[in-house]
Image: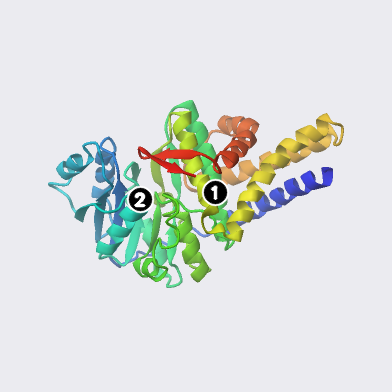
């Protein structure tokens, strides 16, 4: 048992080390501007409180030509009227407002927007997000390389509350690891709040066909389809101006629903790479707790346990610090240290919960 637990932890430490190296070696986004047409697709459902901030961020974009396709996913609040008032005058970009009728859900909304898009590049974000004025420039420059088929971008959680600051660190760690794995040629995760891809490759892989089993997956599952066909076609936008911001959850229940939704995607298609990644993450957290039990039962010395935990913590901190530093985003060391105490329990719970029951998303209930 000691060798098994130590082996899992040591494997994780090696992965962390190579992830840190991969992030450091990943070049920053080229300053060369992409000159093609871009279509920004924004699905929305019940976002009346967030649309003004989104539209204001779009109005100041410096990209020379882009269109925005707002896709209404059966909103039950006043989102549609709010949006119409916001775009009725002084809008410097071309736009369309589409309302879903026979279909529903985020993937259906993106597919509907893509069908009407006239741009060569599709950029997706969420209606509760905002970004800097050079966001589109940063997210599209990678397409000057003909090999690039998809660009994933950084997403940073905002909020002044204690719980929101914890989420900022936790989600930053996930995206830092994901970006590093893209740098290693092993893409595993993307976030639809900041994603860009060629319209031609979306059509080539038949969009979301074959991944309809989950309401989510407009990002990671699509990325895996593209990466399978173009192993070197997925890159990460390492650029301070590529960052998209969105508010972290204020309620624990909403946070858990979101994480259950994300975790539930691992079963779709039953890809071996995804299964192994999910099991490895689970085993690492079990092994981290296992170190403590091995000490309590006299199977491992306190010095050995403290040494392994300390190395793990230092490497995780280096990865997170480098990620936030290079993107010029703040992070809290105290919140990072606090996360170390309960993160394994959280991962184990979500890992189990994502296989049973239901989750809520956008006032809809889905079976896992």
**First of labels 2, 1 by sequence position:** 2
Badge 2 is on which residue? 106
Image quarter (top left, top right, bottom left or bottom right) of the N terminus: top right
On residue 235, which mark appears?
Answer: none
Do the CB atoms of the residues marked 2 and 1 lie less than 8 Å apart? no
Quick check: 258 left or right of 19? left
Instruction: Say which of marks 2 and 1 sits in front.
Output: 2
Q: Residue at x 34, y 57 (%)?
A: 123
Q: Residue at x 56, y 44 (%)?
A: 355
Residue closest to the eye, 40 or 36: 40
Q: Residue at x 79, y 47 (%)?
A: 4
How far across and how far down the image is residue 60, in percent?
25, 49
Residue closest to the eye, 52 or 334: 52
Around disc 1, counting alpha carbons within 10 Å, would you say few (fewer than 14), some (14 to 19), or many (20 or more)?
Answer: many
Badge 1 is on which residue? 176
Q: Is residue 238 visible to the viewer in this orientation of the structure?
A: no
Furthest residue toward left: 89
Name the element at disc 1.
Answer: helix
Image vertical order of residue 212 relative to residue 157, above or below: below
How far across and how far down the image is residue 260, in percent?
50, 41
Quick check: 111 left or right of 342? left
Q: CA distance from mark 2 to mark 1?
A: 25 Å
Q: How is the image coloured?
A: rainbow
Quadrant of the rendered image containing residue 102: bottom left
Q: Residue at x 38, y 57 (%)?
A: 138
């Amino acid at each position: 048992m000691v060798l098994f637990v130590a082996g899992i932890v040591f494997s994780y430490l090696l992965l962390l080390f190579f992830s840190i190296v991969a992030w450091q070696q990943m070049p920053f986004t080229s300053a060369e501007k992409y000159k093609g047409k871009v279509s920004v697709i924004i699905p929305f459902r019940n976002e009346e409180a967030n649309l003004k901030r989104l539209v204001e961020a779009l109005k100041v974009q410096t990209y020379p030509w882009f269109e925005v396709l707002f896709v209404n996913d059966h909103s039950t609040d006043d989102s549609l009227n709010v949006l119409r008032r916001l775009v009725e005058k002084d809008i410097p970009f071309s736009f369309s407002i589409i309302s879903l009728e026979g279909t529903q859900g985020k993937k259906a909304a993106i597919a509907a927007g893509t069908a009407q898009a006239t741009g060569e590049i599709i950029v997706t974000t969420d209606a509760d997000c905002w970004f800097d004025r050079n966001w589109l420039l940063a997210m599209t420059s990678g397409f000057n390389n003909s090999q690039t088929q998809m660009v994933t971008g950084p997403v940073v959680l905002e909020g002044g509350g204690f719980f929101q600051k914890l989420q900022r660190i936790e989600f930053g760690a996930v995206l830092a690891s994901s970006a590093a794995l893209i740098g290693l040629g092993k893409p595993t995760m993307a976030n639809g709040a900041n994603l860009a891809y060629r319209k031609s490759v979306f059509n080539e892989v038949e969009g979301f066909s074959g991944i309809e089993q989950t309401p989510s997956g407009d990002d990671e599952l699509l990325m895996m389809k593209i990466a399978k066909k173009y192993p070197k076609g997925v890159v990460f936008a390492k650029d301070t101006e590529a960052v998209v911001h969105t508010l972290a959850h204020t309620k624990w229940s909403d946070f858990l629903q979101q994480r259950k939704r994300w975790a539930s995607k691992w079963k779709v298609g039953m890809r071996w790479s995804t299964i192994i990644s999910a099991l490895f993450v689970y085993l690492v957290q079990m092994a981290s707790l296992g170190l403590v039990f091995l000490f309590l039962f006299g199977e491992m010395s306190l010095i050995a346990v403290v040494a392994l935990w300390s190395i793990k913590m230092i490497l995780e901190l280096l990865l997170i610090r480098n990620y936030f530093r290079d993107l010029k985003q703040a992070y809290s060391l105290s919140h990072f240290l606090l996360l170390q105490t309960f993160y394994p329990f959280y991962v184990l719970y979500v890992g189990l919960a994502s296989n049973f029951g239901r989750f809520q998303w956008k006032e809809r209930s889905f079976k896992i």
